[in-house]
Image (spheres, rainbow, N blue to C red):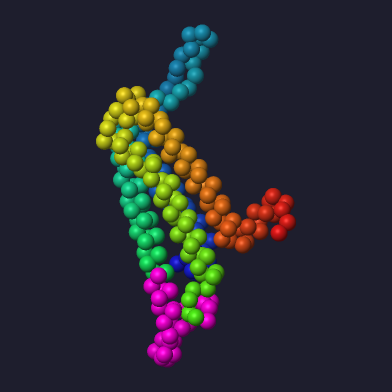
Amino acid sequence: MPLHFKSTFTRSRTVLGIICLFCLSVLFHLPVLTIFSIGWREDPNTNSSRPVLVASARQSMVKINDLLNRNTLPCILFITMIACVALLCFKLFEASKFRSLPIRNAKALGEATASTKGSDDNGRLSPKDVHVVQSVVLVCSIFIVAQLPALLYSTVRVVNPDFDHGGRLVRLFGIFANVSLTFSLLNATLNICVYYNYNSRYRSVFRSFLNLKD
């Protein structure tokens, strides 16, 4: 699919996918949103009241949210992404081996020959195809590494109640939370570098924003 990105991930499919992901996110967090209601808090100094959010059954809902949205779903998606990256690398390796073989029977391998369009004279992947696959694998690998701290500290948070806000290990919890946030920010930053290095169109637009000449 990365080698046929434009035909696989069209603009309409991308917009539809984003909308579906947004709806799923709201649906999975809906139980958490239902525990909040609007209440009134009196201020004795000003003798006035102001609206505030009041939560009911907060502790039980926090545990449900942690199990569902911070552990179960992230683990499933994490394993799925690792499997996809491994499969992509395997398919790339297999394609490289196949394209390096001499084609003796053009009629029998006509379809295979057509699929090698864009490769060089030796039957290997073209530099453009290699760059596409490398960029996809690199972006996914960076994301996997960046999300690993969040996955670990969310799992430990469920197993050990002291590893949380107000627990005995609150300082250690704060350190891991900040490390997780730092890795997430690094993920977004490194993505810019990957796109800049592998995508000429992205690089051109990015440089135009900075008023830099090629």
Q: Is residue 58 visible?
A: no
Where residue 170 appears, as percent x and y from the top left, is 36, 26
Residue reaching furthest to the left: 159
As drawn, 50 above or below 177: above
Closest to the observer, 100 or 51: 100
Magenta highlight on residue 98:
yes
Q: Is residue 169 visible?
A: yes
Q: Quadrant of the C terminus?
A: bottom right
Magenta highlight on residue 165:
no
Q: Count numbered badges in the picture.
A: 0
Residue at 38% x, 45% y: name it: 148
- Range covered by the magenta-colored residues: 93-121
Q: Quadrant of the N terminus?
A: bottom left
Residue at 54% x, 70% y: name it: 127
As drawn, 141 above or below 120: above
Closest to the observer, 106 or 101: 101
Residue at 49% x, 80% y: name it: 122
Where residue 20 appears, as percent x and y from the top left, is 43, 53
Residue at 41% x, 46% y: name it: 147
Where residue 85 appears, as percent x and y from the top left, is 39, 60
Tell me: 150 left or right of 12.
Answer: left
Where residue 73 appears, as percent x and y from the top left, is 33, 47
